[in-house]
Image (tube, rainbow, N blue to C red):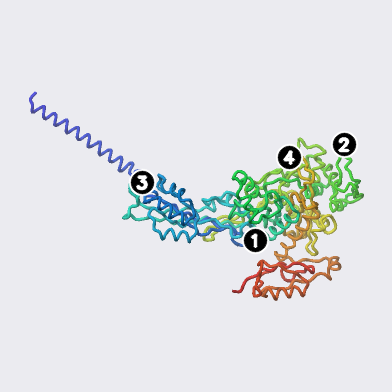
Amino acid sequence: MSSTIIVKKRLFFTLIFCIVIILLLIIRLFHIQVIKGIELREKALEQWSRNIPVPSKRGMIYDRNKNILATNVSSYTIWARPADIFEPDKVAIKIANILDMDSNNIYKLITKKQSLTIIKKWISKKDADKLRSLKIKGIEVVDDNKRYYPMDNFASHILGFTDIDNYGLYGIEKIYDEELTGTNGKWIKMVDGKQKQLPYENEGFFEPQPGNNILLTIDETIQHLAEKAALEALVKNKAKNVSVIVMNPNNGDLLAMATKPDYNPNNRNTLLFNPDEQWKPLDEKERKKYTDLPWDQKSQLLYESWRNFSINDNYEPGSTFKIITAAAGLEEKVVTQNSKFHCDGYVTQIKGAKIKCWRYYNPHGSQNFTEGVQNSCNEVFVSVGLKLGEAKMHEYIEKFGFGEKTGIELTGETSGIVRPLKSMKKVNLATISFGQGISVTPIQMISAISAVANGGNLMEPNIVKSITDNEGNLIKEKKENIVRRVISNQTSKELLEILESVVSKGSGSKAYKPGYKIGGKTGTAQKVIDGKYANGKYIASFAGIAPVDNPKAVALVVIDEPSAGVYYGGQIAAPVAGNILKETLDYLDYEPKLSKEEKEEYGDVLVTVPNLKGLTITEASKRLRELELKHVTDIVTPKKEDKVIDQIPKSGTEVKKEEIIELYLKNPK
């Protein structure tokens, strides 16, 4: 073969090889630029760009009248881009002097091998301005938002709190975290391979989107009344816990839920009450003692202060549970208002069991059912329970919602403890009929009593009214939910009449308020600790309904472990509930209606509250003194020119002389 032919063949194969290589390169380029182009472009942008998150504003939480309960305050967060920082040791000292931080810790942060790092969140505007004025390359001061509760510990167990990243950890903040959390924005900057910002590239800024707002069923005024009453009951009775709940029985809306002791969600890691004597608020000096505790010890104390006794804890209800037994007995017609009973101090129907009436030392003797409820006679209710039988009693316990969660939208609700039907013996039936041997939560108890008040419907307790967007547009509205009918309207009316007589004539007399038609039932139960009844430890309670002819509010007061000497529910819980119901009805513009007997008895000691709106505090105080009325104000030290903008009770209400009128003031300046 000639050399010319060999050369031509070599050139041909070289050409074919080059063509193949070029085709492969074209295919490869097509694959990179077209098929994987979008993916690689995104990866390149990730390498070139650095995003600084811009936090969104968390949604607001309001009471039912749109008073702000949880909001946001402007704050600032300090970010660092370690690759852009020159002389980090000097920069660390400059920042430490402004932020009052350890310069060594700052040095470690600004020399990390990462593109962005947080130095400190939520600094003041003053410190932010100082840092900005230094114009340190690689240090960014970014606008931020901090969750803020304008009334500190007000409704803290309802609202809950958020973490450092503004995500909900407890209460409404946690349950509705997805709704409240907005969408964070971005501040985008372009950088080179050494993570240094490229000065000729454009910056991008994407606005954060705020979260939705939550409107609660809670009424700020009624919540204030409940919190004030709960704190007074806690301190006065040196109690471990106090729960006060106010509910609208007709739709299940919670108007107030107060638990003491409590905490301040603005500074949730600081104790407000003495862990050893929970009824005692801590002063600044005492607080430091617990602030300096090791975290493992302190965290348990803090957790206890965050617990919402109203829904997180079980207790034996004692005689307030007799309302349920009475409702079942009347509904099943095993008893009427006039059924006859005899109390000799001890229950004799159950062999081998010694059950006594609370007044065994001076038995009630002959009485009808209504009088038995007024006297809170254990023997009467044991008799009713035995007539109902284990199966029927257990059926009503479940129908009224005991043994299951109510579904309230708060964290940590428990189910209570109900003995299974198969293990319920006569002795268990007997004790449960007067409120022992069963454990409930305060929210279960008030829901059940509300069913008695509203004509027989068990309502799901509701604490959220609606959800709106940032512009006020309605997103979702919570509707009332009837769980089931538990008793007839007729049974409800009969029982309400009986419960009113308990307050006007019986053991609940300290809840009595002329003209307000309050009905209710006292309760005193020995406390169960570690499965045994603890000597000297009690739970006192009172459940009240008003007015019984058209119920607008139900109040439950539970005082856990009172230790000031008196522990009977009728003595220490009934007056608290009576005051709350009266003040709530006054606020709701209810006009008290005195019966003929009440007019004859109280007519000479009653006065009509005048209209004080628009008067200065000096003028209002003089008017009230003339009528032999007292007053308190929402301002600790009011000025003479401060004017009255609202009052409780409202004008035209008849009250006893020496009654306290609450005045709400506004400074005209």
Q: Say which amino acid is labelled 4.
A: Asp
Q: Earlier in the sequence, mark 2 or mark 3?
A: 3
Which mark is in front, 4 or 1? 4
Is tag 4's residue or tag 2's residue first in the polypeptide sequence? Answer: 2
How far apart marks 4 and 1 lie (CA) works out to 38 Å
Q: Name the residue beneath numbered marker 1.
A: 220
Q: Nearer the viewer, mark 1 or mark 3?
A: 3
Q: Which residue is mark 2?
A: 351
- Judging by the rendered image, the residue that carries numbered circle 4 is 530
The C terminus lies in which quarter of the figure? bottom right
Q: Is residue 342 left or right of residue 124?
A: right
Q: Position of residue 188 (x, y in %)?
A: 39, 53
Q: Residue furthest top?
A: 1
Asked whether the viewer can see residue 26, the reply is yes
**C-alpha separation, residue under disc 2 versus residue under disc 1:** 53 Å
Report x, y in % for residue 394.
76, 41
Q: Residue at left 37%, top 54%?
A: 137
Q: Quadrant of the N terminus?
A: top left
Front one among 447 and 163? 163
Q: Amino acid at mark 1?
A: Glu
Please tell me whether mark 2 or mark 1 is closer to you in this view. Answer: 1
Q: CA distance from mark 3 to mark 4?
A: 60 Å
